[in-house]
Image (spheres, rainbow, N blue to C red):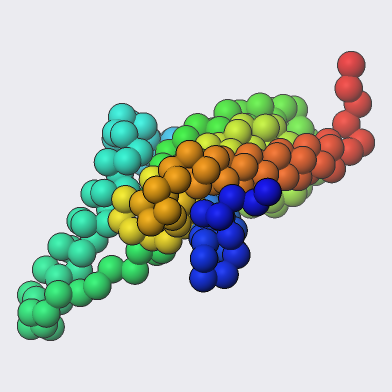
Amino acid sequence: MWPEALAFGDTGFGDEILFLGAPLTFFLALAALVWGLLLGLVNASMALSRSRVLNLVADVYTTIIRGLPEFLVVMIVFFGSGILLEQIASSVFGYEEPIPINKFIAGAFALGLIFGAYGGEVFRGAFMAVPKGQIEAGVACGMTPSQVFFRVRMPQMWRFALPGLGNLWMVLLKDTSLVSVIALDETLRWSKVAAERTQEPFTCFLFATVIYLALTVVSDGFRYRLERYTSRGVRTA
């Protein structure tokens, strides 16, 4: 018998958790992934640069983000962005009213910052794993540095980076639950509301557990297929 707390319609919260919370969880993670991949690539490029200044910037960013609790990063971004925008609006435009912060954008930005710090290390290792002989061969064929990067180094880098990025995506999916503290109505937030309203916390949070597990299982299957696709034509021992 389906639990009453998770009934669909006005009598339960099953539809809110499944059809509102779960999609928001996925799209939040997807938005953070896009932002995090961009940050990770930039961070890895700076870390591998010959410029000591860029090396220092990459090292500081990675150290700060990896040294802070992820919960704290979400809180700092959400409340700090509000203060920053209000200060800019006040000093530049003379606008003194409070500025509402979009919770989805703030959450995706914070999670992307976290993903980018760890993803940068994955990208850095993947770039270094590309055989130097192939890079030298590209140069010997008359390719420009940009052509070597996009035609030789970048395609092979993804093959080395995918396992690590796949693991980070799994972590990112679960870290979306942290955004519930800023009242974004994702899966955990709706589960908490349902638990408080129905007084059946175990049932509601167990339903959220099933949703998170389903998302990670599907993601793991997609990662496996993507790894096989990028490794096509590569001889294995």
Q: Quadrant of residue 97?
A: bottom left
Is residue 157 or residue 153 the one in the foreground? Answer: 157
Residue lying furthest top:
237
Q: What x and y, as percent, mark residue 89?
A: 15, 76
Left or right for 12, reference 167: left
Q: Quadrant of residue 232?
A: top right
Left or right for 185, reference 210: left
Is residue 112 or residue 16 the one in the foreground? Answer: 16
Q: In which quarter of the image is residue 154?
A: top right
Residue 85 drawn above or below residue 208: below
Q: What x and y, as percent, mark residue 22?
A: 57, 56
Counting labels gives 0
- The structure residue drawn at horizontal position 31% and vertical position 29%, both measured from the top left corner, is 67
Whether residue 129 is visible here, answered yes or no, is yes
- The structure residue drawn at horizontal position 92% and vertical position 36%, both measured from the top left corner, is 233
Q: What x and y, as percent, mark residue 88?
A: 15, 71
- The structure residue drawn at horizontal position 14% and vertical position 70%, both measured from the top left corner, is 86
- The structure residue drawn at horizontal position 21% and vertical position 57%, both measured from the top left corner, is 79
Is residue 152 or residue 203 the one in the foreground? Answer: 203
Left or right for 219, reference 121: right
Left or right for 36, reference 137: left
Q: What x and y, as percent, mark residue 60?
A: 30, 35
